Image (cartoon, grey):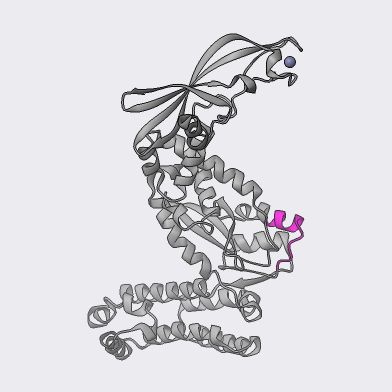
Amino acid sequence: MATTSYLYHALGLIHHLLLRTEFRGGAVYYHVARKREKRACAGCGAPWWEVVLAGAFARVFRAIPVGRRPQFVVLHGHEQRCRRCGSTLREPIEFAKGKRRRTNSFDRFVVELCGIAPIKQVARLLGVGWDLVKDLFKQHLKAKLLRRKMGPVRYIAVDEFSIRKRHHYMTVVLDLETGQILHAHEGKDAQALIPFLEKLKRRGAKLQAVAMDMSPAYLQAVRTVFPYLDIVHDPYHVVALANRAIDETRRDMYRDFKGQEQKGIKGSRFLLLRALDKLSPASTSRLTDLMEMNLPLYQAYLLKEDLRMFWNSPNPWTAESFLDSWLQQARALGNKHFAKLADTLDSHRPGLLAYFSHRITTGPLEGINNKIKVLKRQAYGFRDNEYFKLRLYFLHDSIQAFAG
Ligand SMILES: [Zn+2]
């Protein structure tokens, strides 16, 4: 009796009784058969007394282990002939799906473990293949994604992430209010984004603004679907461009200079890319040396640092006059990299100023970047882009889940 309740509570078998228990090769086999009173006709629903047992079959199912000890259910099943409707049908198996050779509770257990441990460990613990564990978890995430409801999306951030070496990128969209990843798609071109934006539009999303870098592809995508949506160019990405300009300036000068002047620039890269307020006293004194040796490079550095102050403007009007004066100084440097940067910023003026209406950035996506790195390190699984994306969609829900 105790074992019948074990069948029920631990293995999830409700219509079966235990015939015998067998221990073989370190595993436990529970031989079970369907209870007589549970043999209704699978065709017409006639009660058990109308049913006659015909052919027999046996099937083995993997069940939840006890500790490290594997357990199996051996079902001694039958064909059932119905006296009422005349059909001969196999008895139903409620505890496993289709042709699967695992109990449903085993599959659920796999998924649950995947929430707290890496797939490799789950597979090892349960003594099954890594790909089986991954497939089950993948199916689970897929179903969960279908059930997921998208709230009123108002502020989003878009960015690209390198997912593999050699220019494999993924475009990721984050809901800035819920912190949920709404979309992930291979590539970083407009097509990686347009279908998603169209979906948002169809759902009647009341989008207020989108934060992104200044990439023409994303701009084009947003403009195609939402011609009047406010685009906010992310400060971090803009400063990164300015850093590139200073780096290119330094490289040019190094190439053109000789002797003592060249020496002054050597090893200044780190210094120039660093923010002024993050420099150590020693670095600050090196900066003073640089000022004496190479005034143009020093001026470019200061201007680059000054750009950061743009986002401290109290309102769009102050910001705009700041930008105007900055652009003027950048063009006056007589440095082609800064002139180009000035043109770029000038042509993205609305997106730079829009920051002061919405004050959103792609910053929250940067945090996700670290989690993506963790995901990427989990070896093999991420040859499977679909699975990788599913994991991304649920990064937010479960901190542990991305460990696998
Ligand atoms: Zn029947």
The image position of residue 331, as x and y in percent, is 52, 83
Residue occupying the point 46% across, 30% down = 3
Tell which quarter ligand 1 is in.
top right
In-image side of 66 versus 61 (left or right): left
Q: Position of residue 385 (x, y in %)?
A: 50, 45
The vertical placement of 153 against 22, above or below, is below
Return the x and y of residue 189 as percentages of the image width and height.
Answer: 58, 55
- In the rendered structure, the answer to whether residue 258 lies left or right of residue 23 reads left
The answer to whether 266 appears left or right of 64 in the picture is left
The residue located at (38%, 51%) in the rendering is 377
Residue found at x 63% / y 64%: 219
Q: Where is residue 58? Give x, y as percent.
A: 50, 16
In-image side of 214 versus 199 (left or right) = left
Q: Is residue 150 magenta?
A: no
**Of the pair 230 and 28, the residue shown nearer to us:** 28
- Give the residues drawn in magenta, as a range: 197-207
Residue 202 in which image quadrant: bottom right
52 vs 107: above or below: above
Is 57 situated above or below 168? above
Q: Nearer the viewer, residue 95 or 299?
A: 95
Q: Nearer the viewer, residue 33 or 372?
A: 33
| Image quadrant where residue 51 sits | top right
